[in-house]
Image (cartoon, rainbow, N blue to C red):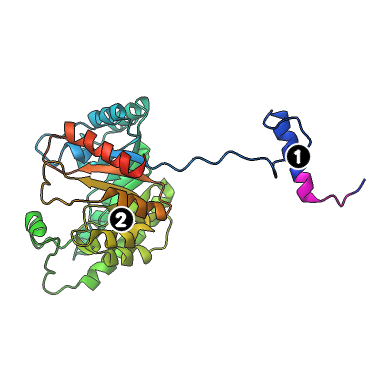
Amino acid sequence: MNHSTDPTSRRTFIGASAALAAGALPLSVSASPAKAKLAAAPKARTKLALATYSYWHFTAKKYPIEKVIDHAADLGVEGVDVLHMQMAEEKPAYLRKLKRHAFLNGVGLVGLSIHQGFVKTKVADRQKNIDHTIHCMELAHELGIPCIRLNTGRWRTISFDELMANRGIEPVPKGHTEEEAFKWCIDSIQKLIPVAEKLGVHMALENHWGLARTPEGLLRIVKAIPSPWLGVLMDTGNFLENPYKKLEMIASRTTFVQAKTYYGGGEWYSLDLDYPRIAKMLAKENYRGYVSIEFEGKENPQTAVPKSVAMMRKAFGA
C-alpha cells in the first residue's frame, strides 16, 4: 500500500464520494467539489425588532409587552426589544409567560433596555447601580434575552427636559470632573464583565446622554474594557449634530442598533435620518445583528410603527 497519497486528493475523493452518495453530484468521474459550481451562500439579512417603548413613551398606563409581541408577529418582525421599566412585574411566572408567548408567536426576545448609571459621586450609589444591572442581567437570562442596554449615566444637575433643550449638555457639579466620572463608569462596568460571561448576557453601551453623548466618550469606555461581553448600542437618534460622521465612528464596535423614527413629530426633537445611508454604513462593517425600531413620535403607534417597519425593510433589505 502506498502511504504517500496526496492528502488533498484524498480529501477531494472522500468529499466527492459523500456528495455522490447523497445525490448531490451527477454520475460522472469529473464531478469533483473542486470543480463543481457550488450554490452561492445567501446574503446575510438584517433582522428587525420592535422596541416596546414605541407603544408606551412613559405615559401613565403601561402598554402590555404581550401586545407588542403580538404586533411584531402580525408585522412579520423577528424580535422584540423589551424596556425593563415597562414590564408589569418581575415574578418568575410573568417572565416565563412572556417567554412562552414570544415563542408561540415565532418572535425572539432579543434585548432588555435597562436604566442605570455610574456617574455617581458616592461609592454606595455606584454599587447600587452595579447591583441593579446584575439583577437585570439575571432577568434577561431568565427571559432568554441575549443582550442588555447599558447607559453611562449622567450628573443630573438639570432636568431631562432642560437637558434636551441644551442639546444633551449638562453642567458638572462643583468639586468633580468628567475624568472622575469616566473612571467610575469604567470600573463599574469592569465589575460586571464576569457576571455577563457567567450568565451569557452581552452588554451594549448606548450612545446615550452623559459620558456617551459623544463618540469619543463612548469609545473611550469601551476600548478600556476589551471584552467580547461588551459592545456598543448604536442609537441612531442620539447624535444631534453631524450624526452620520459620529455614527460611522462607532459602527465597527456596534453589536445592537436602536433605530429612531419620528412620525407626527418627536417627543423632544425630530431628526430626518437617512436610513439607506446608515444601512450601508453598517453593512460596510459586516453588521449582522438586530435593528430595533424605536418609534418616538406623536403619531398613533398603531399607524406609525407599521410605517417605520416598512421604511426599515426598504433601507436594510430586511
Asked if one can make out residue 138 in the rendered structure from this viewpoint, the answer is no
Q: Position of residue 192 (x, y in %)?
A: 35, 56
Range of the magenta residues?
3-11
Mark 2, residue position? 205
Tell me: residue 66, above or below residue 43: above
Going from the N terminus, do you reach mark 2 or mark 1 first?
1
Mark 2: secondary structure: strand
The amino acid at mark 1 is Ile
The amino acid at mark 2 is Leu
In the rendering, which numbered label is found on residue 14?
1
Asked if one can make out residue 215 in the rendered structure from this viewpoint, the answer is yes
Tell me: residue 22, above or below residue 280: above
Q: Quadrant of the N terminus?
A: top right
Q: Please tell me in which quadrant of the rendered image residue 82 appears.
A: top left
Q: Please tell me in which quadrant of the rendered image residue 178 appears.
A: bottom left
The residue most toward the right is 1
Rendered residue at 24%/64% (across/down): 214
